[in-house]
Image (cartoon, rainbow, N blue to C red):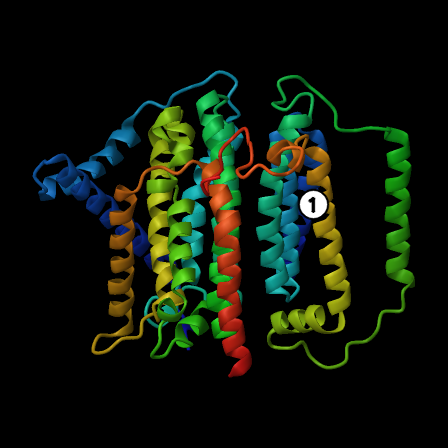
Amino acid sequence: MTETAAWWSLLAAPALLLAGAVLAVAGDALLAARAAGRPATVRTALRPLLEVPRLLAAQPRRLPAADRLLWRLGVVTVPVAAVLSALVIPFGGTAVADLPVGVVWFNAMEVLTWAGLWLAGWGPNAAFSLIGGYRFVAQGLAYELPLMFALLSAATAAESLRVGDIAQAQHGLWFAVWMPLAFAVYLAGVLAFSFLGPFRYPAGEDVAAGVLGETSGVDRLLLEAGRWLWLTSGAAMAVPLFLGGGAGPGLPGWAWSTLKTLAVLAVLVWVLRRMPVVRADRYVEFAWVVLVPLTLVQVLVPALVVLGR
Amino acid sequence: MESVLLAVLGVLALAGGVLVFRCDSMARATFALLLSLCCVGGVVALLGLPYLGVVTVLMMIMEMVVMAVFMVAYMMNPAGLMPMSMLHNRRGSLAVGAGVFAALVIAVFLVPWPARRGGPPPDTTVQVGRALMGGQMLTMIVLGFVLLATMVGATVLATRRGRYDRFGDALDRRTPRDPVGGGVGR
């Protein structure tokens, strides 16, 4: 049974999430250096972190007739939603808040990114930024339903919406093993809601970084941090949903949780550098014509297994 | 503690509802409505139905983001650069609003509320599921079909191109002629 952690976990969970995000950024920088033929050293790995003081000190950009309230709100929403989503993820045997509807909570926080990014695109009153915001909504309509069905298959197999129960229900056989399709769709969803790699379409190079384009200074830092925090949170959630949570031989639960999360994160970071950008209008057809029926069948499998139990 | 939170959420929901009509910008109006609906979701969760509360928040965020797209597309002054009013038929709506409010308040005092028998179940989510998939199964299935038919019908009415445009008059074209290629190679 997953237990609720002490009050200080409320500070520890965001710190852990941030540490994971920093590792992901460093890993991404190393892979980029290797791809470019530069030496992959510690300096290369830490280089992206220099952006943090630079962005903190940068002069904010002012735009005519920007809706500053909505813009600020949208920019703040993305990292805040990522941190809130991590509250239900068990770390070993403890979660900050093991809600009885944890899976739905995670999903709701992830959908909050839709609102955040649309607002971040709308706020600056600039064309490319607006296009970026709309692109994320289009992408959201494509990835959301398959992702929901992937979450549902894990919840159905465990007969619970509590994330701790789902991790417990996989004693011996991970859901990733007998529901590989749901696992793959979930991982694709993680890349999509952190708008990285093949799903960086809302912040695409073709629209001058789209939704990120007009942000500067702290705003830019928050949005960039938001995407990597979301990637880490998604990777961490994959562990209780599909990889058996903190269960494993020899090591304590928290160590297994960390190891598995880092493994998923490494796979995601590797994948996001190896895939081209997918246009939302192409992905939406693939998602609705191929992925939705497949994931529906995938939900049917655990439903039948549970009925026959 | 809970009643304080309930009161705060209730007041915030009302304030959001008022803001919808005070904002010039469609984006602001939409997100004021979202604030209001999220507070309603919080109220539902506080009343002991966490599943319905969180699902309300989830669905309303998606819905309001999609609605923002349509509001901006169809309203005459989406960015709120000029003052505009969302109020129409002021006297009529005032009369209807006041009438409904008065009726509801009177109903609150007139209805013989039943006394509570037994305690609340430990997991209300299971109870909601049983109600929807048990006693109300027929209602939910009919509702589902009605919604689906409405969506398909609205899409068919809204699209100019039909299957004859895509597959030819005799419907004998192998690959459809579409203005934009899709993602599965058609």
Where is residue B37? Give x, y as percent. 65, 47
Where is residue A22? Give x, y as percent. 25, 47
Q: The residue marked by circle 1 belongs to what chain?
A: B
Where is residue A45? Give x, y as percent. 16, 42
Q: Depth check: A68 or A169 in front?
A: A169
- Taking the spot 32% from the left edge, 38% from the top edge, the residue there is A276
Corner quadrant of residue B130: bottom right
Q: Residue furthest bottom?
A: A309
Q: Quadrant of the N terminus of chain A?
A: bottom left
Number of other residues with Cα within 10 Å of mark 1, as a class: few under 14, some 14 to 19, many 20 or more: few
Is B57 on the left-hand or right-hand side of A136? right
- Taking the spot 49% from the left edge, 58% from the top edge, the residue there is A294
- Taking the spot 65% from the left edge, 57% from the top edge, the residue there is B43
Kindly identify the amino acid type of the residue bearing the numbered disc 1: Val
Q: Secondary structure at mark 1?
A: helix
The residue identified by callout 1 is B152
Corner quadrant of residue A279: top left
Where is residue A257? Give x, y as percent. 29, 66
